[in-house]
Amino acid sequence: MKILISDGIESAGGNMLQDAGHEVVNQKFTPDELLQAIPDFDCIMVRSATKVTKEVIDTGKKLKVIARGGVGLDNIDVVYAKEKGIKILNTPGASSISVAELAIAHMFAVCRFLNLSNTEMRSGKWPKKEYSKGLELTGKTLGIMGIGNIGKEVAKRALGLGMSVIAFDPYVTSIDLNVKLVSKDELIAQSDFISMHMPFIKAEGPSLTAKEFAKMKKGVIVINCARGGVVSEKDLLDALNNGTVAAAGIDVFETEPPSEAQKELINHPRVSVSPHIGASTMEAQLRVGVEIAQKVIEALK
C-alpha cells in the first residue's frame, strides 16, 4: 500500500511502516498540491496542520485509511469519510501525559508569576516585592472539564500536589480515582482552578462563555490546553479585566497562529501562553509515531 505522511512522524513509526512492506512518502503539500497527489495513496497520515476535507476525500479514490497522530479529529471530515467507508484512526492516549504536565505547568506559571518574572529579570529588573503574593496549588479545588485520558492524567498530578479534584464529563458516570463527579454548574461554582480537557464542537460553541464566568468564584484560574474555541477568548478577556478570573494559562487559540485581534489576551499580564505545544515532547512524539504506525499497519492488512 502507498502511504502519505503529510505532517511528519517520528522515524521509528516511518520505519515500522516500511518494514511492513508499505511504500511511504513523507512530504508536506499545499492544499492544492494535496488534491493533485492524493489519488495515488491508500492512506494519509496527518497531525493538526493538514486538513482532510470532503474534497480531499472525494479526490482520494483509493483512500482506505485516514490516520491522525494525536487526539482531536477536527481537521478531518470524519462523518463524510466514514460514509465513504474509510477507516479513521487516531492516538487518543499517546500524548496524554505531555498535555497534562503542560496544564500543570501553566498553573504553576501564573500562581508564581513565572511568565512575567522571566521577562522582567532579563531586562534588569528585580521584581521580588511585586511577585511576593503567589499562590500554592496545595489545598485548592481543581475542576476538570472532560475527564478522559488527558483529564485523568491531570487529576493524578493534581492529587499528588494535594489538590481536591472534581470533574464534569457528560459521558462519564464513574471513575477509579479520588475524583468527585459533579454537574457543570457545580464545578463552575466550586473550583479554584478550572482545566479544560473537552473537545470543541463547533455547532455547540464554547464550553466557557460569559454565562459560565458569571457563576465562577472571584479569583478563579482557567487553563485551556484542550482546543481553541472551548473557551470564548473575548469573554475570558472580559473576565480577566473585571477580576472574575485571576489568571489564565492558554496553549490553544481560536485562530492559530493568533491574529492581531488576539494580542490583547496574549499580552495580558495575568496570562501565561504557549504555542499549542501540549503534545510536543520527545516522549509523546515517539509514542504517537509508534502507536499510529501500528494502527495503520493493522488497518491495511
Image (cartoon, rainbow, N blue to C red):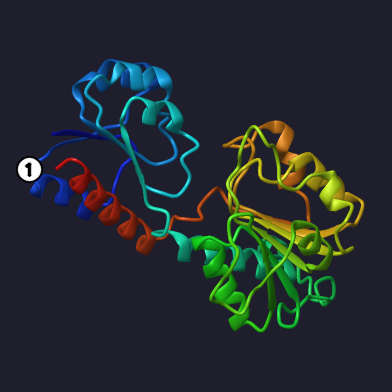
Residue that appears at 24% across and 31% down:
64
Residue that appears at 71% across and 46% down:
207
**Picture layout, residue 20 above or below residue 96:** above
Residue that appears at 63% across and 37% down:
258
From this viewpoint, is residue 112 visible? no
Residue that appears at 37% across and 16% down:
32
Q: For mark 1, does the 10 Å Cα neighbourhood hold few (<14), some (14 to 19), or many (20 or more) residues?
A: few
Residue picked out by circle 1:
21
- Side of 168 where 301 appears, left or right: left
Residue type, label 1: Gly
Measuring from the top left, give residue 17's x and y in whole percent. 16, 46
- Side of 282 where 250 appears, left or right: right
The residue most toward the front is 173
Measuring from the top left, give residue 299's x and y in whole percent. 22, 43
Quadrant of the frame with the N terminus: top left
Foreground residue, 122 or 19?
Answer: 19
Measuring from the top left, give residue 300's x and y in whole percent. 18, 40
